Image (spheres, grey):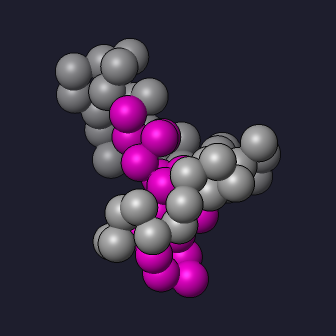
Amino acid sequence: MKFFEIVPSNLFSILASPNKEAYISSLFVIRKAFKQEMSIRKDDLVAMFIGDMES
């Protein structure tokens, strides 16, 4: 289930743009990355973004 099927799209005004799905997905990727390690390389984070977008 997608995040904005559960939560109203205007709950976070910063996430009320046409790209809101990409923004929220990116936030979840960043959260997951920092739960695994305290610091993360930019290349690793970019790879995680790409992997998330492909799935």
55 or 14, which lies in front?
14
The answer to whether 46 appears left or right of 13 in the picture is right
Residue drawn where x is 64% and y is 48% of the image: 6
Observer able to see residue 7: yes
The picture quadrant where one finds residue 15 is bottom left
Image height of 30 relative to 7, above or below: above
The answer to whether 34 appears left or right of 43 in the picture is left
> Looking at the image, which residue sits at the far left?
38
Residue 44: x, y in percent?
Answer: 43, 39
Q: What stretch of residues is rendered in magenta?
A: 15-31
Residue drawn where x is 31% and y is 27% of the image: 34
The answer to whether 24 appears left or right of 21 in the picture is left
Residue drawn where x is 47% and y is 41% of the image: 28
Instruction: Name the quadrant of the N terminus.
Output: top right
41 or 13, which lies in front?
13
Image height of 35 relative to 13, above or below: above
Residue 23: x, y in percent?
Answer: 47, 62
Observer able to see residue 50: no
The picture quadrant where one finds residue 16 is bottom left
Residue 22: x, y in percent?
Answer: 55, 64
Q: Is residue 27 magenta?
A: yes
Q: Main secondary structure of the magenta part?
A: helix
Residue drawn where x is 38% and y is 33% of the image: 31
Q: Is residue 47 magenta?
A: no
Residue 35: x, y in percent?
Answer: 35, 19
